[in-house]
Image: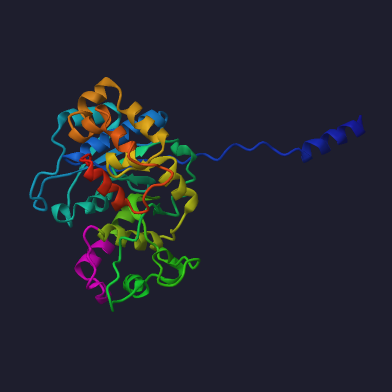
């Protein structure tokens, strides 16, 4: 009996224990809801979230800029049907005040709106022109290590003849904020090639605390606007200011390139389509199908068709005419070429 007991004990000791899968951290999603196109895009995004992630537990916050001296026209969502539809989908519309940007630089909304999110709760910011196409719980977020979208082109800085190069321009910004420039570089790319330098599209970003991130993002953006290094004297900052300040903010918190996250969000779990004609031109069949399934319920259709581009591109199926114009296995390398072809066909609706 003793031998049997020892054998049993040894077997138990060497059998690997079953471990529970790591708990997926809850987080909140924020987007900016504004009058015009953005309010309808926000509704599409929230509807796609509920379609693909019915068990999402975080808050869904639509940040709404309020009318104040920073705006020439009222930026609020005036369409009550949109507001009611967002509420029916469980989204919270929360107002915020522009103190720094406003109508002069509406892209600053995504920076100033972070103030309304609950402190110390992880967040994911998404541009409204984004669909949720997959399971967010599969994305390996590390909210202590922020990153942003790598789905970008070399839009900034623009090289001037005899002007400073990438090293001087980006180096001057890192130096301005006391950041280590060298550790931000991707040295697999050659010197003075744009991909060597930390640069994101601001279509998504995340962090463990929106207040902490937002305060620094706002501070950097304001100082770049108001007191730029002399190396930036020839550089256009509209509409690129948020994308100039964003990599500096991310780097300052120990973040950077996180391909295991950005690859999924850029290509699988979300779709930052920019405008609907571009979605039909270049996205995979599954994304088109998801869009049309998301927009199909009558309650949503009655609201979404109030916006002409959605009515014509989605419901009147003009998007499929765009789709037939392109071979998705051989798309033009530059987005502008796709845009131009759609415009020539008079199907550029946004």
On the picture, is 310 further left or further right than 324? left
Query: Residue, x 16% and y 52% (percent of image)?
Result: 102
- Whether residue 236 appears in magenta in the rendering, the answer is yes
Farthest residue in the top direction? 298
> Which portion, as a residue range, is magenta?
219-239
Relative vertical location of residue 112 with respect to residue 317 in this rendering, above or below: below
Relative vertical location of residue 138 with respect to residue 168 in this rendering, above or below: above
Query: Residue, x 44% and y 67% (percent of image)?
Result: 185
Task: State whether residue 27 appears in this view.
Answer: no
The image quadrant of residue 108 is bottom left
Task: State whether residue 321 appears in this view.
Answer: yes
Q: Where residue 338 sits in the image (x, y, percent)?
A: 30, 48
Query: Residue, x 46% and y 45% (percent of image)?
Result: 264
**Quadrant of the image for the N terminus?**
top right
Q: Where residue 322 sits in the image (x, y, percent)?
A: 30, 37
The residue closer to the viewer here, 219 or 120, is 219
Q: Where residue 213 sits in the image (x, y, percent)?
A: 34, 55
On the picture, is 173 further left or further right than 233? right
Relative vertical location of residue 84 with respect to residue 341 in this rendering, above or below: above
């Amino acid at each position: 009996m003793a031998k049997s007991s020892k054998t049993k004990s040894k077997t138990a000791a060497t059998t690997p224990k079953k471990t529970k899968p790591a708990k997926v951290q809850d987080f909140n999603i924020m987007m900016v809801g504004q009058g015009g196109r953005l309010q309808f895009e926000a509704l599409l995004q929230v509807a796609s979230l509920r379609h693909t992630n019915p068990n999402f537990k975080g808050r869904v916050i639509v940040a709404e800029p309020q009318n104040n001296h920073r705006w020439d026209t009222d930026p609020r969502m005036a369409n009550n049907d949109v507001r009611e539809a967002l509420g029916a989908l469980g989204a919270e519309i929360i107002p915020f005040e522009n103190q720094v940007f406003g109508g002069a630089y509406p892209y600053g909304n995504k920076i100033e709106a972070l103030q309304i999110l609950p402190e110390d709760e992880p967040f994911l910011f998404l541009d409204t022109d984004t669909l949720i196409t997959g399971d967010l719980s599969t994305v390996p977020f590390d909210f202590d290590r922020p990153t942003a979208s790598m789905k970008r082109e070399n839009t900034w800085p623009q090289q001037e003849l005899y002007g400073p190069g990438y090293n001087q321009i980006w180096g001057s910004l890192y130096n301005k904020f006391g950041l280590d420039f060298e550790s931000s570089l991707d040295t697999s790319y050659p010197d003075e090639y744009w991909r060597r330098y930390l640069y994101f599209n601001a279509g998504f970003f995340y962090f463990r605390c929106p207040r902490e991130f937002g305060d620094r993002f706002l501070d950097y953006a304001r100082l770049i606007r108001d007191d730029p290094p002399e190396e930036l004297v020839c550089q256009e900052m509209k509409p690129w200011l948020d994308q100039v300040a964003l990599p500096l903010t991310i780097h300052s918190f120990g973040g950077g390139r996180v391909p295991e996250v950005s690859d999924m969000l850029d290509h699988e779990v979300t779709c930052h389509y920019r405008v609907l004609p571009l979605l039909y031109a270049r996205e995979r069949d599954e994304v088109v199908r998801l869009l049309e399934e998301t927009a199909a319920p009558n309650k949503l259709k009655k609201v979404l068709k109030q916006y002409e581009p959605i009515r014509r591109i989605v419901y009147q199926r003009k998007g499929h005419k765009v789709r037939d114009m392109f071979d998705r296995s051989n798309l033009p390398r530059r987005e502008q070429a796709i845009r131009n072809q759609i415009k020539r066909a008079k199907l550029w609706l946004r």
